[in-house]
Amino acid sequence: MTVCVATMSNGGGIYCAADRMLTRGITQTEPASPKIYHFAGPLKTVVMWSGSSTTFGEVIQTALLRAEKTKYSTIKEYVDLYCNCFSAMQGERAERAILTPLGLTRASLVSSKVSNDRARDLVDMITTFALPDEACVSVIIAGFDADGPHIWAVHNNVPYCHDVEGFAAVGSGADHADSQLRFAGFTRRSVPSAALILAFLAKKRAEIAPGVGRATDMSIMAPTAPPFSVPAEWIARLEKEYEDFARSEKTALNTAIDQGMTVLQTIVASMAPAPTQEAVSQPPSAVSQD
């Protein structure tokens, strides 16, 4: 329950926006804790997350520890690292749920302790094991390597590259954010100001979705500069611009509705049947005289 948005511009910049909403059961809170994290390392990389905070915390900690031991040269390698860590976590949970109660491990499935048929059934159960919905996570991983800017979305352990579109959104408000960007005709060839404003606008549009918070954090990354967290006073200015835009949009809509009523009345009038010639020329009925 949240929304995270990333866009890229023709200048090579990456612009990120996210809310702060945390949902656990029927409880929702907006702590002063951004959902935008920057990886330390040779590549400038940002990750934003939606879904289970506990699952994300477990996976990202493992990924960060492994990233410190390996020199990655592409953003895709970071994406693969995250996906592999997620798969490992899911495999451990499957083993704990299915094998541990039987006194078994994944290693013991190939031993003489388990018959082939039983082992085959257990392997099927493990490979089809799925996390409950409340434990699922979607993330955006974006950054720069020698080939330029990249934006990836990952749902659990399945990655999707959004470099062609130039934007991505995850979370319960993803559809609203995505439709705003598409409606605006946004592409990776858009100018930097459009990438910034539309990332913010997409996040604001997504606030209508269940579970999306009103607080907004933003980050800007450029190929030749360190990541920049947009200050609160800049966010406040964008909020003011959005409020003015929303009011003007509503005024324009009301004007269009009023003009539409005039058009509708004209159409209805033109559809009314014209009186027949017989009805026009017929004299009044004569009154009989006794």
Image (cartoon, rainbow, N blue to C red):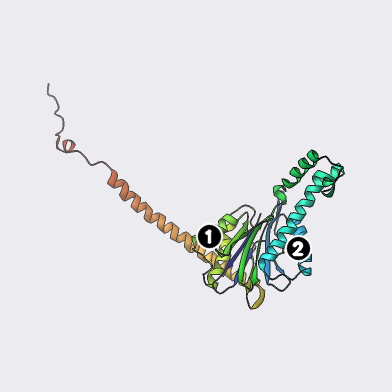
Identify the image quadrant of the N terminus. Answer: bottom right
Q: Is disc 2 placed on a helix, strand or loop?
A: helix
Say left or right for 96 vs 210.
right
Instruction: Name which residue lies at 77% across and 51% down.
Output: 91
Say left or right for 273 vs 79.
left
Sequence-earlier tag: 2 or 1:
2
Between 90 and 185, the one lying in front of the other is 90
Label 2 vs label 1, nearer the camera: 2
- In the image, residue 104 lies at what x, y percent? 85, 45
Q: In the rendered view, tell whether residue 274 sits above or below residue 10.
A: above
Q: Mark 1 belongs to which amino acid?
A: Gln
- In the image, residue 190 lies at what x, y percent? 51, 70
Instruction: Name which residue lies at 76% across and 40% down.
Output: 121
Q: Which residue is mark 1?
A: 180
Q: Which residue is mark 2?
A: 63
Q: Is disc 1 placed on a helix, strand or loop?
A: helix
Is the residue marked by circle 2 packed among few (<14), some (14-19), or many (20+) residues within 10 Å? many
